Image: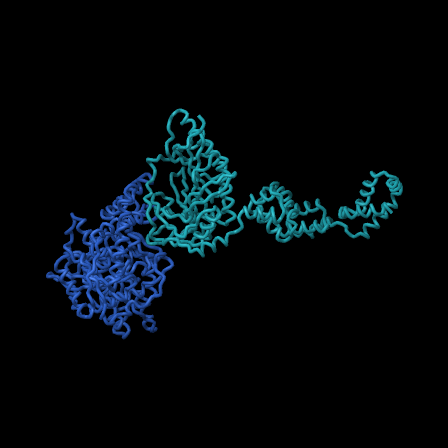
Amino acid sequence: MMSIAKLRKMLDTRQISAIELTQAYLNKIKEVDIKINSYISVCEESAAGAAKEAQKLIDEGKASFLTGIPISVKDNICTLGIKTTCASKMLEDFVPIYDATVVQKLKAVGAVILGKTNMDEFAMGGSSQTSYFGCVRNPYDTSRVSGGSSGGAAASVSAGLCAGALGSDTGGSVRQPASFCGVTGLKPTYGAVSRYGLIAFASSLDQIGPIAYSAEDCGGILNVIAGYDENDATSAKRTQNSFGGKIGMSLKGMKIGIPKEFFGNGIHDEVKSAVLSAADFYRQAGCELVDVSMPSLEYAVSAYYLISSAEAASNLSRYDGIKFGYRSTNGESYEELVKNTRREGFGEEVKHRILLGNYALSSGYYDAYYNNASKIRTQIKKEYNDIFAQCDCILTPTAPTVAYRIGEFENDPVKMYLADICTVTVNIAGLPAISTTCGYDSAGMPIGMSIVGKAFGEAEIIAAADAFEKQFARQEAVL
Amino acid sequence: MRYIPVIGLEIHAEMLTHSKVFCTCSAEFGGEENSRVCPRCAGLPGTLPVLNQGAVTLAAKAGFALDCTVNPYSAFDRKNYFYPDLPKAYQITQFEKPICTDGKVNIRGKDIRINRIHIEEDAGKLIHDEYEGISFADYNRCGVPLIEIVTEPDLRSADEAKEFVEEVALRLKYAGVCDARMEQGSLRVDVNISLMPYGSSEFGTRAEIKNLNSLKSIVRAIEYEIERQTEILDKGEKVVQETRRFNDNHGNTKALRSKEEAHDYRYFPEPDIPPVLFSEAELSAIRESMPEMPQKRFERYTKEYGLPEKDAELLIGDKDLSDFYDAAARCNPSYKAIANLVLVELLRNLNDSGMCISDVKFSPANLAQIVKLSDEGKISKNAAKDILKILFESGGDPLEIAKANNLIMESDASALESIIDKVIAENADSVESYKSGNQKVFGFLMGQVVKEAGKGANPQLARDLLMKKLAD
Ligand SMILES: [Zn+2]
């Protein structure tokens, strides 16, 4: 595993050409991905072509941070002419006729897209086990999950099958797999990155974010993909400074909130102690640790599942077999065709969420479910505001445990839902957060910590994560 | 028993924007099937709606035109249902927070209250091939911006409803919001109707009749429903709350779905579109940019132009005709004469030919020039009609037409004088008779003058000169 920053130097000093670099990654995918199943599609030809173009840019002295850098893209982000499946039978053969804004931006700077990564079906899940194309395995222990829903993205970075990845984060889907796979993942502020071309799961929560070797690399990728997009009315109009701009600045005087509810009973001891020892690092670096509280945390997971499922139920209604995607061969009438298409095209987890979402929105239940969830959303935002009145950022575990065994929660989905407790509030409040590895458990599995920032405070949390990473001894996955 | 009909309307009006409400496809009527479709309005995965600000402004104008409060905060919601003409399987609309509320329109001295106006997107069109048993979807209309105008149940008869729709359509036309072409579907009406026993103040159970697309079908559907519901109530039975469809061929309504079968639309806030916000300044700017509305124009015609009320009303009732008149009146301030020519001659020609004012081959300036020629005494009233008819048939320049057709009147006094001298000399007997008191002979002499001078003679001038000469 090598950082983009390092690869950049090698490319710029002609130690390796972009073509050779891309080929090396493609070879490694061929050799290793059979063990972890992180890619759904690998685009050898177009990647080789892009590498050639990138080399031209390098030769002309027009290279920037991602020029010639091999990147993977989660398979729910539309790529012109390349299958975009959302890991679902429903979109198994769906080939978009346009590029997502983030993909356009990657292409514009000469980044090389190696392929499309595996994930939970329609990004619904935290373990990448619901994929129609088989589950993603953890590079640290292939009997364990990679996390999710951007499991393929995190595993592809962790196993050295790309230099950086684009994932999407609706309730922790970038940070949690990054944590499970021992890499760094950044969920940007809602509106920082255009969602145009991201196949929607829950529109008010979804955000595309980078997964990479380091916080610095994440910042570099974010510099390319962030910014206002007239194609996304929820993208923010603001002038953008370099997200890596605060790296190396002194942390002295920085106030870090430690919310006690995030270190409660459900959190595994080894996780707790690793995160608290990271807190100690910050204290020694001159930061002030502040005890803070988020009383509504206990309602957060319920609110998250109600809101995200309600939006998902609506967003996924367009898959009716009429215009694109899978169409059932059974059914005489329109109604039957739609029913059978959806029955056959969606997996179990997706159907659960659609049912839950429609239930939460149906008349007679709307107030009790969707409306109450919205009230909790408002309350959580308020509690974050209160916390940020006292501190600059917040430190929490990324997940209650390390990566668990494949199939472990098969019969207890609620327990798996509860595992989202550390990440969902960030999406609910639209805040930025970065997860980086802060330790390893007794079995050698990576433990992740998350630093949550103020809205558009990416530069601060990237700098804080970078400071920790610079002194932390990474243990790489060996496949 | 006798009943009072209680009627409320939902008017769907397509707004006159260039592009659709959430994408940049053309919103124009027509076009080859699916030629005005993009990834966005086709609902392709990953696409997002981007609100057309022009549609928002027009909806606000509709609000001002119908005397509504235009709200500084409004927001969009999703209305979820499966239908093949709806690619996303949800319609983006405004449910909780509509852009306009609390309006009113006066009909026959009575205020009809408007509950709300909200913005929404139109759906596509299904084309069924009954023979092959296949259906096709045309998404050209999909995403065309609509406003839905919802009234309170204040209407009490089919005629009132018709008059209300006419007035709303007229105001929307004047405001530039909608062309109100019912035959093209740019204005559609849903009718809610129930019957209330005389003397009662409690509304009955209502039926909703969907998608009426002509004034005639609105009237017929309401009349049919009144009859149908009266029959039910007279039998002591209950009206079922349901949605009905009007059949134009049979003139009746048929149940579409009952209340129990009604869709649960599972409305919730549209997460892809931020709320629509207006500042005070923005609202007053829109208000100030409102085109002249019918009432204002009526006042201008009657007070400034001095037109009779009936003429003003006639003109205003047809916006295109009224606009034509206005343009002509700007060229020549002979307001009344122009109004007469428009309302009598122009309308006659339009009716005879079955043409629309937008089809005519001449400009308002041409028409104004005819009146000017007449005002200046260069042509007679009859010649004005003739010139208009020629213009109507083949276009051209009024003065040239007048010259070519020998319609310019002889206004040269000396030329006329010599003609009159000649007539007097050649008709000594008649002159003698006139001078001895036989007034009738004047007509004969005048006829001789006109005969000599030709059609172009200015009759007034000729008459004056002849009188003067005979008196000598
Ligand atoms: Zn379009």
Rendered residue at 23%/49% (across/down): A302
Q: Is residue B339 visible?
A: yes
Residue at 27% over, 63% down? A71
For chain A, what colour was chosen? blue
> What is chain B's hue in the picture?
cyan
Q: Residue B94: x percent and y percent? A: 38, 47
For residue A435, what is the image quadrant?
bottom left
Q: Is residue A55 left or right of residue A156?
A: right
Seen as rendered, the residue at the extreme bottom is: A13
Task: Give the residue drawn at x 14%, y 63%.
Answer: A274
Where does residue A93 sit, x and y in percent of width and height?
A: 29, 52
Outermost top residue: B235
Q: In front here: A258 or B38?
A: A258
Residue B410 placement (x, y as % from top left): 77, 50
Image x and y of residue B281, in percent: 45, 57
Number of labels in the image equals 0
Residue A427 left/right relative to B144 = left
Indicate how the structure is coloured in the image: by chain
Q: Quadrant of the N terminus of chain B?
A: top left
Task: Decide if residue A41 is in sight here.
Answer: no
Task: Give the camera-side residue of A267 and A67.
Answer: A267
Seen from the viewer's position, the closer of residues B38 and A266 is: A266
Is B213 left or right of B323, judged from the image as shown? left
